[in-house]
Amino acid sequence: MFFLVATTLCVASDYSNDSVMNSTFILILAGNEEVYPSRGLTVSDITLIEQMFWYTLFAYPSRMIVFKAFRYRLYPTAEQEQALSLQFGHARFIWNWALALRKAVYKETGKGIGYYELQRRATALKYRPGMEWLKDAHSQVLQAKLQDLECAYKNFFERRTGFPRFKSKRDGQSIRYPQRLKFNKNLIYLSKVGWVKNSFHRPLEGRAKNVTVSKTKTGKYFVSVLCEVEVVEPPIRGGEIGIDLGLKSFLATSGGWKRDNPRHLQQAEKKLKRLHRQLSRRVKGSAGREKARVLLARQHEKVANQRKDFLQKVSTELVSRYGLIGMEDLNVHGLIKNRRLAKAIAATGWGEFRRMLEYKGKWYGSYVHKVDRFFPSSKTCSHCGYILDELPLSVRTWQCPICETVHDRDINSAINILNETRAGVVRSHAGGESVRWRQGATVLAETGNPSASRHLQFGADVSGG
């Protein structure tokens, strides 16, 4: 009399010629008592089946595929460092050769040259007299560099970055292995390099797709393993917040609290100036200049690590506490053109922070909504909605001439961003997506799921905003 509802499939040999059917069709067919009178389904049985169907559809956690990168420190031997240096040098040569060829072809014909034509010419280049040394490099490493150049051109034409430049051995080096990945405890196998010692400070997850080996300007080696991970799609979180990014305070929230800007670069400027002076006094090509260069690079690396650590912690805190996060869609590339604020804006890492929020939101079940950059969040009164004609950047607090409410500029902006986010979420889901989401929460409530009340409350707050 009762059906066994599995994760996605049900056994129903009595109702169909197929031994296994999709549970959705089974339950829909079973909804009509007159279809199968011999089974003796009652109204209570059908009601129970329908409840089981809706619970399976909305309450059972679905799974999704995400890509995660795991970065570890490498400790190659002296011989392995030479082998890696050879791979870096050959990959750098292919990049510079392909870039020069593309520029020359465009100058002569006015047309570009595609990736596959570059790949064909690169293969023929290995067999030219005097170019046999290119065969010492891994062939797929060289192909990966051509793919990187193609991606760099695409990003340039889509105005996400500048025009590709030639690479130097004094810059950071990197190569990518797309296949033949082997791991053994604290060892990783790199083709034409061997088993290299590394530090697996955390276990890998999922299936490894490719490996990127990099060398920093300080001489440290790292390996980044890109993995395809199947994770349970996180449930909808409660709580909402609007954030306004700034320079004095890194961010101000609609809840009234702020997070100070740590100013890592400004704190290290005195030491950086001293190291720059020491470097400029050294003779070019000497061992002393190389030592001074490494000391300067280490200080810059420390500042970058401090900034990244701060952004990681703040972004994780937000996505783990709030299900709806609103922020401005800032044009960072345009803002840094201001010569008086460019250094301070670049040192805060607004763009990287937004990127972290977006990909972590998918992992933790948070929705990050970007408000239009032209929305007057700072000039709008969050109490009555009055909009000022102008509000200079130097004014940090102001009083509304209509309701006489005194506003903190940043917190008022965060509140307006949250209000606009609520309205924007409703508009973006007007096609029915939010309706299905709320219907699912309603079904959970009917079946007695304890998390349904939180979902319904969050949905009411969003739709009611």
Image (cartoon, rainbow, N blue to C red):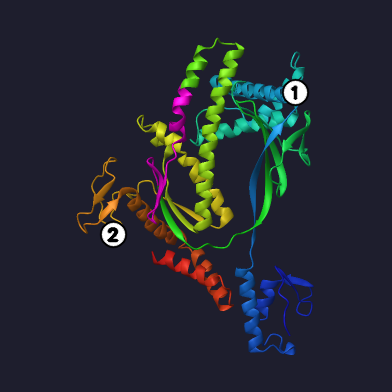
Where residue 154 appears, x then y in whole percent?
A: 55, 35
Where residue 216 appears, x then y in whole percent?
A: 61, 28
Instruction: Examine the structure image and report whether residue 252 is included in the region drawn in magenta.
Output: yes
| Residue displayed at 64% across by 47% down | 67
The quarter of the displayed image where residue 241 is located: bottom left
Closer to viewer: mark 1 or mark 2: 1
Residue 368 is tagged as none
| Residue displayed at 59% across by 60% down | 234
Mark 2 neighbour density, 10 Å: few (under 14) some (14–19) many (20 or more):
some
Placement of 435 over or under 197, stated as above or below:
below
The quarter of the displayed image where residue 426 is located: bottom left
Tell me the element at label 1. Answer: helix
Residue that extends furthest to the left in the rendered view of this protein: 401
Is residue 195 shown left or right of residue 25?
right
Where residue 21 appears, x then y in whole percent?
A: 74, 71
1 or 2: tag closer to the N-terminus = 1
Question: The N terminus is located in which quarter?
Answer: bottom right
Mark 2, residue position:
383
**Could you tell me if residue 31 is visible in this image?**
no
Mark 1, residue position:
78
- Numbered circles on residues, count: 2
Relative depth, front residue between 268 and 135: 268
Is residue 227 shown left or right of residue 428?
right
**Could you tell me if residue 245 is visible in this image?**
yes
Tell me the element at label 2. Answer: loop
Relative depth, front residue between 58 and 347: 347
Amino acid residing under circle 1: Ala
**Mark 1 vs mark 2, CA separation in Å:** 66 Å
Where residue 193 appears, x then y in whole percent?
A: 77, 28
Q: Which residues are magenta?
A: 245-273
Placement of 3 over or under 203, stated as above or below:
below
